[in-house]
Image (tube, rainbow, N blue to C red):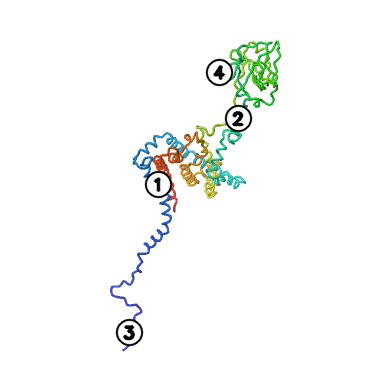
Amino acid sequence: MSRPAPSSKTAQAPGSDAGAAPVRDRRTPRRSRLLALFFLLPALALLGALVLHPIGYSLYRSFFDRSGESFAGLDNYREMLDDEAIRTAIGNTALWVVAAPLTATALGLVFAVLTERIRWGTAFKLVVFMPMAISMLAAGIIFRLVYDQDPDRGVANAVVVTVHDTFTESSAYPKAHPGRASPLVAVPGGGFITREPVGAGVPVLLPLVGVAPDQLPARAVPARAATSDPVKITGTTWQDFTRGGGGRTNSVDPTELGYPGMRIEAVRDGQVVESTRARADGSFALSARAEGALLRLPADNFRAPYNGVDWLGPTLVTPAVIGSYVWMWAGFAMVLIAAGLAAVPRELLEAARVDGANEWQVFRRITVPVLAPVLVVVLVTLVINVMKIFDLVFVIAPGSVQDDATVLALELYRTSFGTDANQGVGSAIAVLLLLLVIPVMLVNIRRIRREEP
């Protein structure tokens, strides 16, 4: 009898599940996590040592006194808010946060849009972006010179003085004044006037002193005593000083120089009836209408030379430093915005133009809304950057006005490491600065998560 052929199916053990999936090794995810942690460990160690530990220690140190030995509670925070310099720093930081990012972003947007339409747009972008290659310290030194009060050194004041002097000429005699026993007296508002009315036939002497010989105009020549004229008022105005000594007071001596261009006015009852200017030798003549009037040398004869704007004074130092920051970072904003602008569909712009929109409407209604995400990125980045601004303020602002220009980062340094160092209050400033930065960072993180696919 033949044996039956074995079945093609493999015999299964009783109770076995023939259709069950292969068992996965539960240790695999754990090994993956341990492997990832192993590779992340150096980065986490650096993060803890360079970020988390300083933050924690600053928070801890802010509750202790100057020496760090006695617990001070919230005293450092109260002292921080009571300090006038720190309150000024908070106000200036707020001004920085509002003005600097907005200005840099607006300029970057304008540059990015305009450079698309010019032939040398790439070269222009390179020039605008070039300041980013300069360190904050070097930029501070550059702008310290740019804002110098002396127009011969400061570029800003050289431009301002040139424009000003184009319309208003300064005087050559800013320090001139009457000498002893002079017939002239000062008048309110500046200038000088004769004590007695003048008359025809008697030359009038208007001596002044106080102008250095090398500061007199080049066209000045030795003064000449005016000759009498029976129908005119004549006289001389000159430098009543003889170099090397000698000479007679209120008398025209041979080596004394005239005051060319000096304006002389005849004043009667508070009204100017006639005026003239002195010749190169200081002599002048007025018509008979000046008979019985007082002669006045008006204040514009003694206007001091215009030295420009006090950029680094208490009033303008913060806007001046913000200007240097914008010079550096407008190129950064321009490059990011230009990259976003390159991705804008041209069909949208052309469709708007076909529908009759002008360039301003296209810019306002199409370009700006489409670029809004990029503009937010630039603004948030610059806001975080300006909150920790230190170098420019420290280098540009002179020591006499640093209290007026100070910001939180600079005040943190001055309080912690200055002559009267108090690291307790300095740590409190650091904590305040951290609290101000955190909301901006959260906004940035939320924006990044929202843009993730």
> Where in the figure is residue 380, as x and y percent of width and height?
46, 44
- Mark 4 → mark 3, Cα distance in angstroms: 139 Å
Question: What residue appears at the point 47 percent right and 34 percent down from the top-left corner?
Answer: 404
In the visual, does 117 lie left or right of 96? right
Q: Earlier in the sequence, mark 1 or mark 2?
A: 1
Q: Earlier in the sequence, mark 1 or mark 4?
A: 1
**Which dot, 1 or 4, sits closer to the camera?**
1
Q: Quadrant of the N terminus?
A: bottom left
The residue tagged 4 is 188
The residue tagged 1 is 55
Residue 335 appears in the rendering: yes
Q: Residues within 10 Å of mark 3 (few under 14, many from 20)?
A: few
- Look at label 3 and name its amino acid: Pro
Residue 4 numbered tag: 3
Q: Residues within 10 Å of mark 4 (few under 14, many from 20)?
A: few
The secondary element bearing badge 2 is classed as: helix
Label 2 close to label 3 by CB (< 8 Å): no
The secondary element bearing badge 3 is classed as: loop
Q: Earlier in the sequence, mark 2 or mark 3?
A: 3
Q: Earlier in the sequence, mark 1 or mark 3?
A: 3
- Mark 1 → mark 4, Cα distance in angstroms: 63 Å
- Look at label 1 and name its amino acid: Ile
The quarter holding residue 207 reads top right
**Which dot, 4 or 2, sits closer to the camera?**
4
Q: Earlier in the sequence, mark 4 or mark 3?
A: 3
Q: How many marks?
A: 4
The residue tagged 2 is 164
